[in-house]
Amino acid sequence: MTSYDLIIVGGGIGGSALATVMARAGRSVLLLEQSLTYQDRVRGEWIAPWGVDEVRQVGLYDLLLGAGGHHLSRHVTFDEGRDPAAAEAEALPLNIFRPGVPGPLCIGHPKHCQTLFDAAGAAGAETLRGVTVTEAVGGAAPHVTFEVGGETRTATARLLVGADGRTSQVREAAGIALHQDKPHHWFAGLLVEGAEGWRDDLQAIGTEGDFGFLAFPQGGGKVRVYGGYALDEARRFKGDDGPRRFLDAFAVSCSPENRHLVAGRPAGPLFSYINADSWTDEPFAQGVVLVGDAAGWNDPIIGLGLSITYRDVRIVSDILTAGDDWSTRAFAPFAEERAERMRRLRFAASLQAAIDMEFGDAARARRHSYYDRGAVDPSLKMHGIAVMAGPEMAPPEIFTEDHRARVLGAQA
Ligand SMILES: Cc1cc2nc3c(=O)[nH]c(=O)nc-3n(C[C@H](O)[C@H](O)[C@H](O)COP(=O)(O)OP(=O)(O)OC[C@H]3O[C@@H](n4cnc5c(N)ncnc54)[C@H](O)[C@@H]3O)c2cc1C
């Protein structure tokens, strides 16, 4: 039986980042990851400007840049009925949202995880892979029993951290309830290679017909693309030729540049998710704290899971390094901040989903009305500030039903 300050279950973004920060702070950490290699599971590869600030604050920014992270500098919103050249002429510069942050940061998720996992080991954490956790217990004497390399081990700690993603075993074991919104649309993602023609600094979103698309270049001719479509089209991209048909759906007239995506090749799996938000009331219990998706996740339509996770890591590591009080009382401010953060982001995501991922004549008319009115009244676009600059940067009245009705007009 070995004993640590922290046992962290899950060596993805949140677990490996927290392990690195805490090991650097001189705490003993055991980091347990179930996979043997990080695979493309269609997870986040775009960090919002406010998330980049969080990465900086926990001291991991140079590490990510060194691992190939690169910044995007322009955003274009395309839409059917809108001249593509006019849309490009109104490209949004992405360096305006946080002081000193040149724009969102893109890095492949498997590379991102491996870089952080290695950093945790280099900082002194004990890191294990290929681990099967058979028991995770919080309470007054937190401990974990796990199998690795044919052996069964039990380890104890002052605190057990659940960083084990959406289906968190630690959350379940601690009896922390997960709440979930109703799904709104399907959201599928694919890594494309051979798309060298797509400009390396340009992110784009757009809606045409029955398809909403997003594109985030990863460098080296690779682009992470996402597509949204109606809930009743569950089988739309199923089958062996699903990835090819998915890429063909990017052939839209409102964004001629999409031809570079259509000309590309699938470089990973195509996974589809029912989009939805989820949250926990209190992401902790005695002897246990949750970070990242384990604590509840935001609808990926606004791409903030990594930023949320890095903020969790900053706040939790600040609490853990501030003193010796690791009781539930110490985590109450984390729960309070996270509840309001996720409430605001849930609102922003549902508004964005209504704008980008609803299809048909009425939705199109509403979208165009929003763009026209937004051009003269920028306050209608304020939820975008929450997405890019941080949820606390938009005024509270933005996250109300009144604002929703103003944005979506009579059909809200
Ligand atoms: C389609 C889609 C698109 C997205 N796009 C974006 C985006 O553009 N930007 C963004 O910021 N976010 C995005 N996200 C969200 C983002 O990927 C997640 O919020 C983020 O990866 C959460 O990090 P995490 O460390 O909590 O979880 P994960 O990255 O899921 O890592 C969890 C780790 O725990 C391990 N694990 C799980 N169970 C166990 C166990 N029992 N024992 C040991 N190890 C275990 C897993 O193997 C994994 O390595 C997207 C999500 C989806 C689904």
Image (cartoon, rainbow, N blue to C red):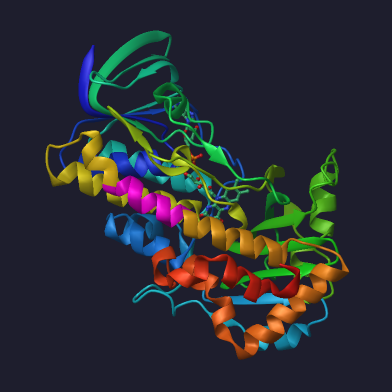
Q: Residue at x 45, y 60 (%)?
A: 69
Residue 300: where, in percent of width, then height?
59, 53
Q: Tell me if residue 341 is in the magenta stretch.
A: yes
Residue 328, percent from left and from top: 25, 35
- Does 371 lie within the magenta span? no
- Viewer-proximal residue, 167 or 139? 139
Quadrant for the N terminus in the image: top left
User: Residue 307 in the image: x percent, y percent?
Assistant: 44, 56
Residue 262, quarter of the rendered image:
bottom right
- 174 and 169: which is toward the camera: 174
Locate residue 163: give its quadrant: top left
- The residue shown at (70%, 78%) is 370
Asked whether residue 71 is in view, the answer is: no
Type of secondary structure dominating the magenta stretch:
helix
Residue at 22 percent across and 49 percent down: it is 318
Horizontal relation, residue 160 to residue 392: left or right: left
- In the image, 259 versus 393, the foreground residue is 393
Placement of 412 over or under 180, stated as above or below? below
Q: Which residues are magenta?
A: 333-342
Q: Name the residue furthest left.
A: 323
| Residue 231 x %, y % | 79, 48
Horizontal placement of 288 versus 45: left or right? left
